[in-house]
Image (cartoon, rainbow, N blue to C red):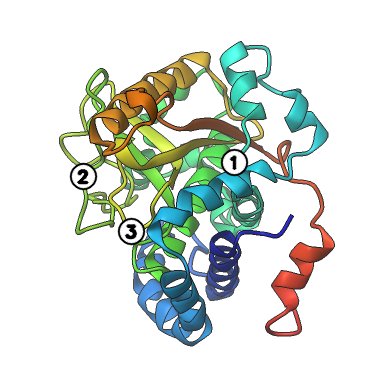
Amino acid sequence: MPIPIFVAAILEVIAAALALYEALDVLEDIYEGLDKYNKGIEQAKKELEKTISSLKDEIDKKISEKEQVAMLLAAAGTDPQNSKTKRGEGWGSDKTVIKAAIQQRIPFRRVISEVCEKADAMPVLQLRKKKGITVKDLPKAKRKALEEILRVGLENVADVDLDQFVLVRLKQFAASLMFEFVDYCLDWASPLKAEVTFGPAKSYNDPPLDGATRLKRVGKISPFYPFPPPNNRAGSLSADLIINEYRKEPTGKNNLFAIVEIKFEGDKLEAKQFENYEELLKKAALTKTENSPIRYNNKPVSSGGRLSLFRYPLDKPLEETGEEKKRKTGKTGKK
């Protein structure tokens, strides 16, 4: 089945953005990396403009808003899940709600896998300095910086291997920065949004925005934490990744195609987190019902969106088909 043009064009933009992002080497140090990142992204975007301008035009001019959901559904229908993912096997699959999330079909599995692969290998993940200093040896100021990146007090993780915990969380942090960079390159209109906060519980307010489609960020060390008010209250949810139905519409309950929770090997899986996401999706279904101008037989919207779990590397996709490789190499003659 042909790759939908919307998904294919987005894939090309993301591939170009990630290649340059990796070449910039802006995250060599876990404490200075964010500052380098902030200084480098404007230059990176300028370098990308010539490469992706035609692709952005292709997305904007050839794809109508009303077709995007159909294209996402088509892409999800051809989700290249491996056999373990299809069967919901492996780490964390003993809980029904988690197994269902593992098996959920989604678009952009290859993109998510590629980002995780790069995050897994980025130098930001080096926990030990050249002199052999560990996290426990850091001065108070740097420990505080690390706490903000991890979104948890280090004293609260005394019962786990601290270096392993930090390693996993930094992988997620690096992945989120990459998704944010892609969003930036697409003028904040990427269908993939990282670290999206809804909250607090029960109401699950939509995430605050800084403009029409850009998510509001207030963190100085980690852009994703602390959460912006009013979603900084207890009981709020922060989704690792949201896939929007319409990329040029605000991210929120009325525009959810899927919630994707990303877990790296060694991270914990808790059923409660996925149960909370299901409550959020129920709220999203009510919101979509209220805002839907036309409903078949006046029936309410049955689902607020999909709930997916992507475990890296366990849920990596199948090998690319010949058509996918051809699409990647067709315009430039090389990958």
Residue 208 image label: 2
- Decide: is 64 above or below 232: below
**Residue type at the position of mark 3:** Lys
Q: Earlier in the sequence, mark 1 or mark 3?
A: 1
User: Foreground mark, 2 or 1?
Assistant: 1
Question: Marks 2 and 1, Cα distance to the nearest angstrom?
Answer: 25 Å
Where in the figure is residue 198, as x and y percent of width and height?
29, 33
Q: Which residue is mark 1?
A: 106
Q: Earlier in the sequence, mark 3 or mark 2?
A: 2
Instruction: Give the residue at x 70% y 71%.
Output: 328
Q: Are marks 1 and 3 in contact (CB under 8 Å)?
A: no
Q: Which residue is mark 3?
A: 248
Q: Residues within 10 Å of mark 3 (few under 14, many from 20)?
A: some
Where in the figure is residue 85, as x and y percent of width and height?
73, 31
> Who is closer to the viewer here, 197 or 56?
56
Q: Residue furthest left?
A: 230
Q: Earlier in the sequence, mark 2 or mark 1?
A: 1
- Residue 304 is at least partly visible in this image: yes
